[in-house]
Image (cartoon, helix red, strand yellow):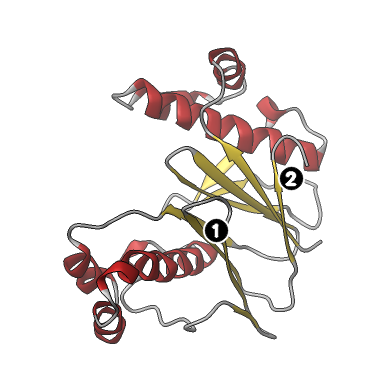
């Protein structure tokens, strides 16, 4: 199995949100309740519900029966089961879009960002990118900087999520300038929707990435 990426919207009907809510575990409901704004709360519920639907469809398990563990940096994994090889997954979301990547090949990471102007771009780049990366970014024409920023950010975050590290490793992480497949690593950039940039990373080479929308193909 190579890498399957599913894209879904995070603004479903109230009825769909209620149905998703019925499938969530107590800790997920507690996390949802912490959101101040209803739109953010509902998007979290929808994201977790969609994740459960997708993983359940691969495993032949009802969504509400899935159980998760979390790494120290919050990366979710399925609790150990008799399923072999294990099903690896990762998710990323931005505004009203969620991407969920699934594979049996190896752990992986995915990120997605909505491309928009960044008022404090230079300071953010200096904080999270290497000196060389920040300098190269600021050398670009101003109108090209936001997209270039998010291209680098998503690739870095996907790599860190694949390894289970936190954002503190962004500045020290060196990655290729262009998305590519190698014998030892998969690193792919793609456009999941207009004005969005996505990236997927895995510590295994030669993996094919296929993308669909959920629930329809």
Residue visible at 70% across and 39% down in the picture: 54
Mark 1 falls on what kind of element?
A: strand
Residue visible at 52% across and 51% down in the picture: 194
133 with respect to 48 (left or right): left
Q: Which residue is disc 2 drawn over?
A: 81
Position of residue 37 relative to residue 92, above or below, is: above
Could you tell me residue 88's position as x and y percent? 67, 55
Quarter of the N terminus within the rendering: bottom right
The one of 193 and 150 positioned closer to us in this rendering = 193
Query: Badge 2 local density, few (<14 within 10 Å), some, or many (20+)?
Result: few
Could you tell me residue 127's position as x and y percent? 21, 70
Quarter of the C terminus within the rendering: top right
Mark 1 or mark 2, earlier in chain: 2
Mark 2 falls on what kind of element?
A: loop
Residue visible at 69% across and 33% down in the picture: 53
Question: Splitting the image into 4 quarters, where does residue 86 fall?
Answer: bottom right
Q: Which residue is disc 1 drawn over?
A: 110
69 with respect to 86 (left or right): left
The one of 112 and 28 positioned closer to us in this rendering = 112
């Amino acid at each position: 199995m190579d890498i399957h990426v599913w894209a879904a919207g995070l603004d479903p009907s109230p009825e769909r949100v209620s149905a998703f809510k019925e499938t969530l575990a107590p800790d997920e409901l507690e996390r949802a309740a912490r959101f101040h704004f209803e739109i953010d709360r509902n998007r979290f519920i929808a994201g977790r519900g969609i994740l459960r639907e997708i993983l359940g469809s691969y495993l032949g398990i009802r969504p509400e029966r899935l159980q998760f563990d979390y790494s120290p940096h919050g990366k979710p994994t399925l609790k150990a089961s008799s399923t072999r090889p294990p099903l690896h997954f990762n998710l990323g979301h931005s505004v009203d879009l969620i991407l969920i990547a699934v594979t049996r090949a190896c752990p992986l990471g995915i990120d997605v960002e909505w491309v928009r102007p960044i008022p404090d771009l230079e300071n953010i780049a200096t904080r999270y990118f290497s000196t060389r990366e920040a300098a190269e970014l600021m050398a670009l024409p101003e109108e090209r900087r936001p997209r270039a920023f998010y291209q680098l950010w998503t690739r870095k975050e996907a790599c860190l999520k694949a390894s289970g590290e936190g954002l503190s490793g962004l500045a020290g992480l060196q990655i290729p300038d262009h998305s590519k497949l190698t014998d030892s690593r998969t690193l792919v950039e793609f456009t999941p929707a207009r004005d969005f940039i996505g990236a997927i990373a895995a510590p295994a080479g030669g993996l094919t990435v296929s993308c669909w929308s959920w629930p329809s193909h």
